[in-house]
Image: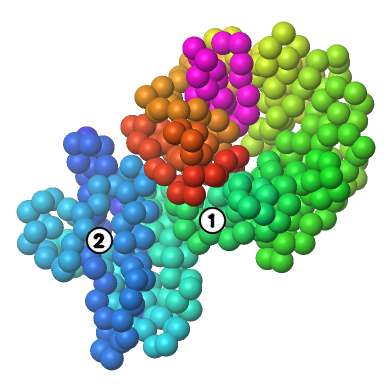
């Protein structure tokens, strides 16, 4: 059984300042038990209606598999102690019109020692974002690690207007249409404000940068041929992409301001679906140079390319883990597409969605490396799912039945 020894120093307005020493032990499942109590109204507060920040916090903490969440209708210290739940979260709210004030506390059970208190004042539309923020603070306080609760997902949704880019929270909430008409595919993040995508704005696939706030499109790569698969690396400030402007599809990179374009792959084969390693020193890409689509890893210049997939005749969509030690990709086995993970050199391959019915494609890692996002097509419907790597638990992100090509932000 693992143990965490945590020293907390709480300095919060409206609370006394004191240092609390608390030993927290994981239970037999290897997770930390934590209680989440339904928040209570302050005097004269209006009803929150369907706004339930405590539910968002519960779902957040359950997501990564680091916590065992006990949901409580009211604070019952005796029950917490009896069930060996060492910490709990409670809160009070005051709602006046569209404004909400939340007072949230993380406490040790028994003596009710305050470990972390936060007060937030916000518009009601921001309730989910505030809950995610508090969940992140709890995760950081108890585990000393960053969590994915405030991260974003971008994907493609097919509708009557075409194919459009959608942005949402990691759990599918707060859905925003970044584009509303036309054909827009292959989205990926530059930062919180800007998204890359391939758009048929001029009747052919070109690469654009889209401002999330106003939907403005700025062309980045527009040739007379096919341009696809853009991915950005914040370390080197470059966008990697594929283009057929020289004949075959080959891999190129360019600065996000459109300058200093460089060709990375050269040959008679097709090379596409390239992606940067987190540090920008390596790339992974798909090439048919061996006769069928396979994953290769090379230096950022294209030198020292090594094939890493050998288990089947089709592999696609490589995605680097946040720590740069693994690559997820689409692998076809027995005519079925599924998600696989291997080390960067191709060793230790694991097929992680073998028990999932349907076709699985387009993997993308969560920023903490705990989950992989992918597109699942089954029964005539296509949606975005995340699989938790520690126990293969699935979380359905979208419910439209026409969502695909998702990417997880690394922030």
What element does badge 2 sit on? Answer: strand
Up-down: is 352 above or below 24?
above
Choose top left, top right, bottom left or bottom right for residue 41: bottom left
Up-down: is 405 above or below 24?
above
Taking the spot 13% from the left edge, 58% from the top edge, the residue there is 80
Up-down: is 396 above or below 380?
below
Taking the spot 20% from the left edge, 41% from the top edge, the residue there is 27
Q: Position of residue 71 (x, y in %)?
A: 21, 58
Q: Position of residue 34 (x, y in %)?
A: 24, 54
Instruction: Check disc 2: other Cα within 10 Å, few if <14, some if 14-19, many if 20+.
Output: many
Q: Is residue 232 magenta?
A: no
Identify the mark at residue 36; answer none if there is no mark.
2
Asked whether the viewer can see residue 34, the reply is yes
Q: Position of residue 177 (x, y in %)?
A: 62, 59
Asked whether the viewer can see residue 342, the reply is no
Q: Position of residue 296 (x, y in %)?
A: 68, 18
The magenta segment is 312-339
Taking the spot 7% from the left edge, 54% from the top edge, the residue there is 82
Image quadrant holding the N terminus, namely top left
* Closer to us: 189 or 103: 189
The residue under label 1 is 168
Q: Is residue 148 left or right of residue 239?
A: left
Taking the spot 83% from the left edge, 34% from the top edge, the residue there is 226
Choose top left, top right, bottom left or bottom right for residue 283: top right
Q: Which tag, 2 or 1, sits closer to the chain's start? A: 2
State how many labels appear.
2
């Amino acid at each position: 059984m693992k143990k965490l020894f945590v020293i907390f120093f709480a300095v919060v307005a409206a609370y006394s300042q004191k240092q609390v020493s608390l030993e927290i032990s994981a239970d037999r499942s290897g997770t930390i038990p934590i209680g989440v109590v339904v928040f209570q109204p302050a005097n004269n507060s209006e009803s929150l209606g369907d706004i339930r920040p405590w539910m968002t916090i519960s779902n957040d903490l359950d997501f990564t598999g680091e916590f065992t969440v006990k949901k409580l209708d009211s604070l019952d210290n005796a029950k917490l102690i009896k069930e060996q739940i060492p910490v709990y979260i409670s809160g009070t709210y005051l709602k006046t019109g569209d404004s909400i004030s939340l007072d949230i506390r993380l406490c040790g059970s028994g003596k009710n020692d305050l470990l972390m208190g936060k007060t937030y004042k916000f518009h009601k539309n921001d309730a989910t974002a505030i809950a995610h923020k508090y969940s992140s603070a709890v995760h950081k306080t108890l585990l000393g690690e960053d969590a994915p609760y405030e991260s974003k997902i971008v994907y493609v949704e097919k509708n009557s207007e075409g194919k459009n880019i959608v942005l949402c929270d990691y759990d599918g909430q707060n859905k925003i249409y970044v584009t509303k008409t036309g054909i827009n595919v292959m989205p990926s993040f530059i930062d919180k404000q800007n998204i890359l995508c391939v758009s048929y704005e001029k009747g052919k696939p070109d690469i654009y940068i889209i401002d999330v706030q106003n939907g403005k499109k700025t062309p980045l790569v527009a040739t007379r041929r096919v341009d696809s698969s853009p991915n950005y690396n914040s370390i080197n400030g470059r966008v990697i992409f594929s283009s057929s402007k020289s004949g075959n599809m080959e891999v190129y990179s360019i600065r996000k301001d459109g300058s200093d374009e460089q060709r990375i792959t050269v040959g008679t084969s097709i090379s596409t679906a390239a992606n940067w390693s987190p540090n920008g020193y390596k790339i992974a890409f798909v090439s048919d140079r061996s006769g069928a689509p396979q994953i290769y890893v090379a230096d950022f210049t294209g030198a020292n390319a090594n094939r890493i997939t050998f288990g089947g005749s089709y592999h696609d969509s490589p995605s680097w883990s946040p720590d740069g030690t693994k690559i997820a990709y689409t692998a076809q086995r027995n005519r079925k597409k599924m998600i696989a993970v291997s080390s960067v050199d191709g060793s230790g391959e694991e097929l992680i969605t073998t028990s999932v019915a349907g076709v699985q494609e387009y993997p993308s890692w969560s920023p903490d490396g705990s989950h992989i996002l992918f597109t699942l097509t089954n029964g005539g419907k296509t949606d975005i799912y995340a699989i938790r790597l520690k126990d293969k638990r699935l979380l359905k992100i979208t419910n439209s039945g026409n969502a695909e090509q998702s990417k997880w932000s690394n922030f």
